[in-house]
Amino acid sequence: MTTDAVGAGSRAGRNLPAAIAVGVLLGGGILLALLTVRHVFVGIVAAAVAVATWELAGALERAAGIRVALWPVLVGGQAMVWLSWPFGRNGVLAAFVVTILAVLLWRFRGGVQGYVRDVTASAFTAAYVPLFAAFAAMLVIPEDGAARVLCFMILVVSSDTGGYIAGVLFGKHPMSPTISPKKSWEGFAGSMVAGIVAGALSVRFLLGGEVWQGVLFGVALVAVATLGDLVESVIKRDMGIKDMGTLLPGHGGLMDRMDSLLPSAVVSWLLLQLFVPV
C-alpha cells in the first residue's frame, strides 16, 4: 500500500483521482462500521480475505502454473477470521492448522507432479492472507476495539501519505532499485516522521497509552509496512506481473492494497496487547 517514490512521475500508469476516490470510499465504509457496530469490521475483513486469496491464487496459477488448493484455503481463511471473534488466537491457530491438513489432502486429487510446490504455495497463501488478516479482526474484539483498529488504520494511512509526499518532493535515492525502484529513502523518512507523529497521538488520545509507546508503535508499523510493500513487490517481480488483480480502479487488485496492511495487522495486535492490555 505504501507509495513513496522517487520523483513526481512515480504514479505513472495509475489513475490517481480514481485511486483516491476508491481509498476514500473504502476508508469511509470501515470508519462507519467502527463507529456504529464495530463487529461489522470482522465481516469486512472476511470479505477482503476471500477476494485477496482468490486474486493471489489466480496470479500464482496464471504466472507460474502453481495450483493453490483454493477451496480449502478459502474456507479455512473464513474460519480463521470468524473464529477470532469468539475464540481469539486459539481459534485462529486451530483453523490455520486444520486448513493446512485439508490442503495436504485436497492436493492428492492433482497427482504427484508438483505436489510439494502446490502445497507449499497453498500454505504460504493461507498464512500470508487469512492468518495475518485475522489479527486485524482480533483488534476489534475488545470493548475498545474500535479505537485499536483506528490506531492501526491511522498509522498505516499516515505512513503511506507521508511517504508519498516526501518521495514526490524529495525522493532521489532508491531504497532497493532491483525490487522497487520507485521507493526512496527520502520517502521512507517521510513515512517514519508521519508514522511517529500519528502513533504518538493515536495511542495517547484513543487508547490512553503513553507517548513513548505510540512512538515505538509508529516506528514498528512503518518498518513493517515498508517491508510488506517490498515483499509483495518481490512476489510480483518474481511472477512477472504488475498487479494481482483489476478489481479497484487506480489500485489494481485488493491484494495490491493489502501488502502493507497484512503484516502491520500482526504487529499492531502484538504491540497494542503489550502496551495497552485488554
Image (cartoon, helix red, strand yellow):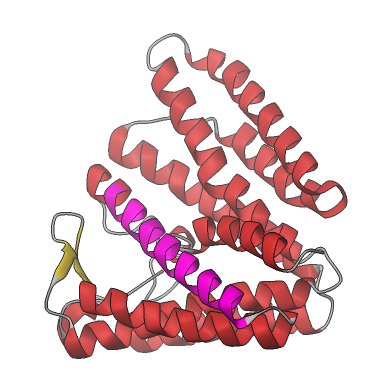
Residue 68 vs 203, above or below: the answer is above
Give the overall secondary structure of the magenta segment: helix
Q: Residue at x 32, y 47 (%)?
A: 235
**Depth check, front residue: 23 or 111:** 23
Residue 154: x, y in percent? 56, 81
Q: Residue at x 22, y 86 (%)?
A: 168
Residue 88 visible at all: yes
**Residue 151 sits inside the magenta stretch:** no
Query: In what quadrant of the picture does the C terminus appear?
Result: bottom right
Magenta segment boundaries in residue numbering:
211-234
Q: Residue at x 22, y 73 (%)?
A: 185
Asked if residue 10 lies left or right of residue 203, the reply is: left
Asked if residue 274 lies left or right of residue 36, the reply is: left
Residue 68: x, y in percent? 48, 32
**Depth check, front residue: 194 or 130:** 194
Residue 182 vs 245, above or below: the answer is below
Query: In what quadrant of the picture does the N terminus appear?
Result: bottom left
**Depth check, front residue: 230 or 44:** 230
- The answer to which quarter of the image holds residue 273 is bottom right
Q: Residue at x 30, y 78 (%)?
A: 189
**Depth check, front residue: 216 or 141:** 216
Residue 234: x, y in percent? 28, 49
Residue 22 visible at all: no
Most extreme residue toward the top is: 112
Residue 227 vs 26, above or below: the answer is above
